[in-house]
Amino acid sequence: MKKKLGTIRENGFLYVFEHFIDAHRAALIALLALLAIAFPYTPVADRSTQRIVTMILLYAMLGMGLNVLTGYAGMVSLGHAGFYGIGAYCCALLTTRLNFSFWPALLLAGCLAALVGFLLGLPSLRLSGTYLSIVTLGFCEIVQMVLKQWDSVTNGNYGIRNIPKPELFGHQFNLQNGGFYQIILALSVLTALGCLAIKRSKYGRAFQAIRDDELAAGMMGVRTARYKILAFVISAFITGVAGGFYSVINNGYIEPNNFVFNVSVLIISVVVVGGLGTIRGMFFGAALLQLFPQVFPQVFRFLNEWRFVIYGVLLVAAMRFRPQGALGWQSTLPYPLSRRTREELAHRSVLPGGEKGATP
Amino acid sequence: MQTFLGAVINGLALGMAYALIAVGYSMVFGVLRLINFSHGAVYAFGAYMVFFFVSLKLGLLASILLSVVISGLLAMLVDKVALEPLRKKKSIPIATLITTIGVSFIIQNVLSIEYVFGSERRAFPSTNLFANLSIGNITIQSSQIIMLIVAVLLLGVLTFLVQGTKVGLAMRAIEQNRKAAHLAGINVDLVISFTFFIGGACAAIAGALIGGYYGVINPGMGSTIGLKAFAAAVVGGIGVLHGAVVGGLVVGVVECVAAQYLGSNVRDPMAFVILILILILKPNGLFGKKGITKV
Amino acid sequence: MKKWIAIILVAALIALSGVSLAESEGIIKIAVAGPMTGDNAEYGIGFANAAKLMAEKWNSEKGGVHVGDETYKIEIVEYDDKSDSDEAAIIAENIVSDPDIWGVIGHFASGICMVAAPTYQDAQYINISPTSSHADYSGIGDYIFRNNTVITVETATGADIAINDLGGQNIGVLSIDTEWGVSAGDAMEANIEALGGNFVLRQEVSESAVDFATEIANFRDANVDVIMVAGMYGTLAPFAVACKNSGYDVRLVGCSNAYTDNLLSIAGDAAEGIYAPVSFFAGNPDPAVQEYVQAYTDAYGTAPSALTTQAYDSVGILLEAIERAGVLDREAVKDAMYETDYQGMSGYTTFDEIGDAQKVFTKIVVRNGAFVVAE
């Protein structure tokens, strides 16, 4: 079915843009996939670019993890660096001490973080809003303490070194051969698909119901306790896996200082700047916040010292002028009804033009 | 027993420092239900202003007074520029949270800039103005006594302000229902600005006294102590002024006793361990009013 | 329209910065990587200042570095790691993608050195850290050197001060909970016992700590009369103040990084009698040292500290190794590094087989508000 886009002047940029994307979805996805896969073989992909892109995707993944909790279920965590650290240490310890291969270790890192997420989710039954955020903040501090104090396991402040690079059937993944990029690309795409599936399932709707009005959600029969904990578990799992991946890309060395409060702030900034509750926003937010310190001081050398100040201004300005995030627009597309509903509607001819109701 | 007593006294002294900062948190939260993450940064700013004026040879007391006024104005400015528009737009709570984090980033990093003050630690004029008090093996410094006196005075003044004056009445009205307060003819924006001014002023007093007690300041000084003081405010029941003082003392004492018996490494997270326990057992804090957790 | 102007301007700026990088004939670049902004910025800036001073000295006195028949001008390029290991990892990649860079002086904190070093090793870029203390650091590879002292040698001198110069009967150790603080603290404990001293109590504090009441009470209860402090001046100075304010009469021994004017300015009177072992001392009557101190003070307004000086020497060591190799070949320069035999400002330096510098220490003490050599 052919749609008329009209001009930007008539319908607004967003309308035209969204309908263009909707119309050419398959082609655009194919193009994006081609670009993403070909990236490490293009001449722009030198070592530092690869590293930056890897970090962008890593933070997009971290953002998606927090987004499940904050964007979907409306609970603000200031302690995601804790889960990140748990995942990283779990993966690093399993591979260095117990000679696990990277892949099962990565999965177990996610599972351990999810287990801790379950425990941290318990107070969420009694606390809400700001109070919950503070508990998560305390959680991050406590994880720090454990990583620093539990010498016999975590090696304390000395950190863990010689974390082996991932291998699969004898092929080693590293920065130079684009291996790190490929792994994080796969992980972040999987996460994005997973998040999309959650968002569209009954779980996602339950999360959003809790976010918008917990009391009403409970009255409508949503088991709020169960879903709140589930949001914590899913969020922690994603963050833990991201942490496991981080442990191998950091030149095989991690220490407790890699997982401090500032990292939590960075993750939450990705979510908020990109657009709460959106998935595209996580990639955009991560790209913006990772590229900013790379590009900005190069272009405006004299402002190098002001970088952190400007970073703060960016956050404040983003909240003031676009609190829904850069890509957090309200869709102008018609609500995607399920196929059954659509058929039924078409059958009853309620909507003129049937299927998508967007004909001129 | 001697060591335990020593730890408790150290804890009370440290707790006074937390209490001084926590009162400011409580003040703003009490009116706006808003965690002002920039409070710790304003505290550092206040200390640096004192440092700056003292270096201009203005005398300690005059410097502190000037710093208190400037910090109060800064806090007001923060509210006017960054927070008021969010209130007007009825933004989501997370937006204000992020904004205050952003503001604390800005303040702390402006102070760290080489041409402003630089990121390294600086000497701060001591507030040990008279001789130490010695009881047996335990020494109490005059700067600690000053902290105690000022904290109690501040608590008294603020409690009077909130409970006994017209402005205080307006604050309480705004806390309960902003729209109704507005309809009743209260200039809501002005009262909120005033609250921020008081919050900033408290932070500057804390910065001056704590800086004088330790004798050293740095731009990041507000981040850890700010979070702990915040924990203290919540432990005492955030929004309740005397709760902030008691919470500060509780956190200080527990921290020092824990450091004494469990090793000094557990001290930093201790504030949060108490916080989590209190929140799970008694979500409104020690003195908190019922039903303020529901938004 | 405005948008387009902005875009064109940005593009032009990027292009310009690209052009300025392009012309690099007859130049040898040395990267200085460290925290230039944010926490610890004083150290990164100190590294860069010292490196520039050394580069200027070579450029003006000898016209640059002589490699074979050619002379190359030396250029120092600064990289800011912001005390952040993610950032350091990216910087390391940036550095190794510049073929004109022949050596990297830097990274300040041990943890950050550990993250960046494998990249340099991989790309065969010589890396000299003036400060790293992690035991495994120089073992990362043969291109990785440190022009810092091996911590055990430094703390042995400290323990000697505590036991013999100060006559400590009960010696305590205060360390900060960073990788450096913990290893230095451990080394101190071992050194005290090895030298026959009586080690009584170890206390650990966080790097940002300013409240030492509990630690002081514990030291006092254990009758400690000398405390060895494994912390930078930022910890040592407020600790000294706190000891003095609480009326605790104790002698303090710091590490070489305590030797900076900031210690005196923060601790004031409380700094009196603090001892420290140093490999560099600005009061050293050696004319070469005096000339350096004068030049540094003229250029930057403050006297050089021990760590800054180690960065200064690191550049000299690297440049000499390049001349000795006689050819711009990374492997040859690396081999030449192991033949280092350098009389620098921070003492006479050689490298052992894994790339650790061997140095000799002087004992200094604060008297009447100034550092002097201890008698």
Image (cartoon, coloured by chain):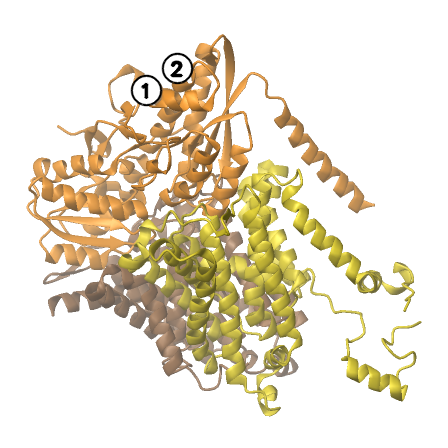
Relative to B222, is C219 on the left or the right?
A: left
Residue C164: tell me if it is visible: yes
Q: Colour of chain B?
A: brown
The mark nearer the N terminus, 2 or 1, is 2
Q: Nearer the viewer, residue C179 or B170?
A: C179
Q: Tell me what hue chain C is rendered in.
A: orange
Q: Does A198 sit left or right of B294 as displayed?
A: right
Give the percent coordinates (x, y) of residue A246: 48, 54
Instruction: Look at label 2 and name its amino acid.
Output: Arg
Query: Is A107 drawn above or below residue C198 in the view shown?
Result: below
Task: Work out whether residue C75 or residue A334 is closer to the camera in this orientation and state it.
Answer: A334
Q: Residue B218 placed where, x, y %?
A: 39, 49
Q: Quadrant of residue C266?
A: top left
Is residue B66 depicted above or below A203 in this figure?
above
Residue sitting at x 64%, y 66%: A193
Q: Which residue is mark 2?
A: C324
In what quadrant of the picture does the N terminus of chain A appear? bottom right
Residue C66, above or below A190: above
- In the picture as drawn, the residue positioned furthest to the front comes out as A169
Residue C102 on image: x %, y %: 48, 25
Q: Residue at x 10, y 56 (%)?
A: C222
Q: For chain A, give the colour.
A: yellow
Q: Chain of mark 1?
A: C
Comparing A131 with B191, the one in front is: A131
Q: CA distance from mark 2 to mark 1?
A: 9 Å
Q: Which residue is mark 1?
A: C339
Looking at this view, name the residue that lies furthest to the right. Answer: A360
